[in-house]
Image: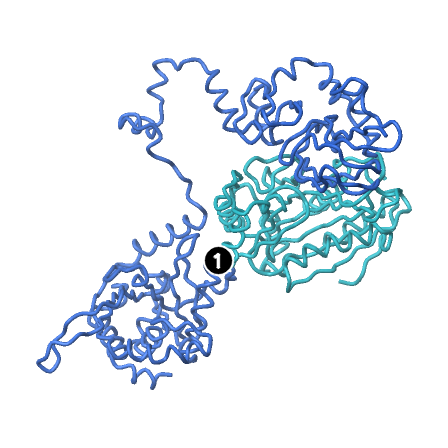
Amino acid sequence: MAEQVPLRAGDVVECTWLEDGDDSQRNVDLDVQLGADVGAGRRPPTVRLWRAAPGLGIGVSRRDVATDAACAAAQRLRQHGVDVVVRQTGGTAVPQGEGVFHVSWLLPRPAGGATTDQYYHLLCDPLVSWLRSFHVEATTGPLPGSYCDGRYNVLAGGRKLAGTAQAWKGGLAGLPSSRPGFVLAHACVTVMADHELAAVWINRFYEWAGQPWRVTAETGVNLADLVPAAFAGQGAAAATERAVRSFAGHLGEWLSRRGVRWRTTPM
Amino acid sequence: MGVYEFRLPELGEGLHEGRIERWLVKPGDTVQEDDAIAEVENDKALVELPSPVSGRVLEIKVPAGQTAVVGDVLITFEVEGSGNAAPTAGGPAADVRTAAVEQAGLETVTDTVAARHLDTPAASTATAPAPPDSPTPVRQEVLATPGVRKYAREQGVDLSRVTGTGPNGKITKTDVDNYLQQQAPDPAPAAADAEPALARAANAAGKEGAEERVPLTAIRKRIAEAMVQSMYTAPHVTLMDEANVTELVQWREELKPTAAVRGVKLTYLPFVVKALVAALKQHPVLNASLDSERQELVLKRYYHVGIATDTERGLMVPVVRDADAKNMWTIAAEIDDLATRARAGKLSPNELKGSTISITNIGSAGGLFFTPIINYPEVAILGVGRITERPVIQNGQVVGAQIMALSLSFDHRIIDGAIAQRCMNDIKRLLENPRLLLMEV
């Protein structure tokens, strides 16, 4: 186990596929429910691999909808048939829909020796190595103009394949707390997303909300575009499911090589 | 009782600032150790800060929405015992980094932050002043997103020399560009010759920035390519005619309550679809495509009608499949569903493929006659204009009538004008006598 990764050899990580395809907001909020269980020690550190609810949508942060104008903008989008879900992590709006899959790491909030970078590495490193298995050379870094830009975008060919963000909730582990805390490190990976349409709606949201963020569709890329042979003839839902299964297999191996015990529930 | 100062901890490598998103406590509140007191966003991580002590909130030093630097005092508490406040009021602790780390239970990983923060006077002189209503002067260094920092590095710009125009003085990419522009030497006279035509035109008109170049989106490019292919492949002819749809208008009004009960939005399009399909059965050459390679006409014995739909992204043509086998209610519901999902971008690619003929409706936008472009490789497209109330002579009397404008474009390689007009006549006959449509259901 690399020193900087907040897991140690012998730790147990559980993989869950829990998702709610009917209620998109609940689908997002499941991260918090599971995280609370992780923080309280009711379940081991967990990786949740999940797909967004079907249909076009965007996921915004709580800061994004902190003003009346932003709430009205979200409502206007919903009236246009665009689903808007609010997530707990930081950053700005991201694409949602059946062509996107999510990786949510849920770990107890540490009492010391932790930085956001460590969790970003835990999140991004297996994604990068998984992409390598498709012969896709990926890296992490910022990409101005991309959705939810930050230092830990997963980039392939200079375009963004995954966006990442975190939420640290509750109190520190090891201290008496009414709300034992957890860290959520989250990535959304675009397998077969409509970046163009997502950019239209994200920009429209910020325009209506009176906020300055803007994105350009050309900064985004889909896994299906990078490795078309792997997803030939598949629709977004099927391609995403295939990608999730593939990543789950890779992640299990990645953790096992580091001495972390991996257990998974049937998908 | 003593005073305990809580400082912003460092949360990420090399990140020495964080924005206070929300305070979860207010002065006077009593908190227990480990209670969440604030949310700070840093590097896209929204971090709840737990209170390191039990006590009473005295003062919030950095308001919500403000960016603070690692080590800044965020909040003070009244606590049992002596507290940790520095003896000189307002003075920083001897080692703010260590203090912040100890308080938050978090560990710093770089030494540069505190060193730069405490030992580099130049850094503080380059910062924007704190707002006048700020309770304490919050020490700010350069505020910029990682992307802007990277851009500045690539351009060789020292961000401390750039004035930020974003929130809280945050430096934007435009600020960097403006700085570069200011630093650039005056252009040589020859450079004027190399000025882009766009700028020259704008300057000639005396209106700097009077034009804007907007890159075409991918879908716009596809629309453009499709239009060009159709227009320059199929020689278009357009027939224009009018149908007296007075009875249809009345019938639709009568059907509206029933449609409401069924939850169906009943426009004129389902009637037009049904009339068109009935006419195509009489004139199958219009429901066809040309296989130019084999020089064969492919007659389609199925009727998939494309409905041109205006969306945010541009024109889309979702398809009502097997329209001949569906009743009017089903077609109405399907058109409504397809149009709604087209505008929301929720259609699957298969729902946008396979039409054998298309209908385009300019009437909803107020238009009358036009020359629709065929949805190639189809061979015809029916354009529907708005319905207008006009005087007509009927049995020697001038009466009011509802007149629908129709435009039928066809590929003249395949279809002769007379055939197209006969097809148009059948469409008109059905729309003018909606009872005949019943026979087609």
- Chain A is shown in which shade? cyan
Residue situated in front as seen by the camera: B91 or A165:
B91
Query: Where A103 sits versus B120, above or below?
Result: below
Quadrant in the picture for the N terminus of chain B: top right
| Residue B273 in the image, given as x and y percentages of width and height | 35, 73
Q: Residue furthest left?
A: B396
Residue situated in front as seen by the camera: B236 or B95:
B95
Query: Where B382 sits versus B73, above or below?
Result: below
| Residue A89 in the image, given as x and y percentages of width and height | 68, 45
Label 1: which residue? A80
Query: Where B176 sits versus A182, above or below?
Result: above
Quarter of the rendering containing residue B306: bottom left
Could you say which chain is coloured blue in the image? B
Q: Residue at x 91, y 46 (%)?
A: A10
| Residue B311 in the image, given as x and y percentages of width and height | 42, 56
SS type, badge 1: loop
In the image, is B347 to the left or to the right of A96?
A: left
Quarter of the rendering containing residue B188: top left
- The disc numbered 1 marks a residue on which chain? A
Q: Residue at x 25, y 74 (%)?
A: B423
